[in-house]
Image (tube, helix red, strand yellow):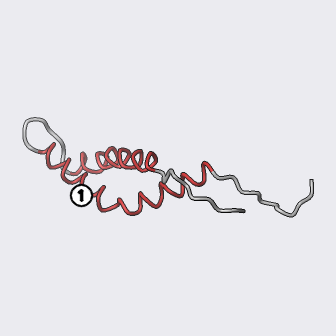
Amino acid sequence: MKYAKEENLGYGTNYVLTVMMLFLNLLWYQPIFGISYEDNSIYYFLMASTFVTLLLQPWFMRLSRVLFLYFTIYYNTHPYEKK
């Protein structure tokens, strides 16, 4: 297979993973600490969610690139098979 430089590096997939992580953080933060509009707990949640997302960002970037390649590049599993 000939290699060509890919222009799209999976930025859209990385954005989706980042937004998904925001909602997944809500699943563990809400039962443990609780979120209320009456105090500053929503700001604490946003700070904790930002910290966790930034901590996981290198893995998100790699995962988004791999997912992008899986969805866009199709490999021939039997290259020497005659048709």
Residue 35 sits above or below residue 51 on the image: above
Q: Residue at x 14, y 45 (%)?
A: 43
Label count reads: 1
How far across and how far down the image is residue 19, in percent?
35, 44
Of 26 and 54, nearer the camera is: 54
How far across and how far down the image is residue 4, in percent?
62, 59
Location of mark 1 (residue): 51
* Image-based side of 67 in relation to 50, left or right: right
- Local packing at callout 1 (Cα closer than 10 Å; few below 14, some 14-19, many 20+) is few
Q: Residue at the top extreme? A: 37
Residue 43 sits above or below residue 79 on the image: above
| Quadrant holding the N terminus | bottom right
Mark 1: which secondary structure? helix
Q: As shown in the figure, which amino acid type bears the numbered disc 1?
A: Phe
Q: Residue at x 25, y 50 (%)?
A: 29
Q: Which quadrant would residue 60 be assigned to in this image?
A: bottom left
Q: Residue at the right extreme? A: 83
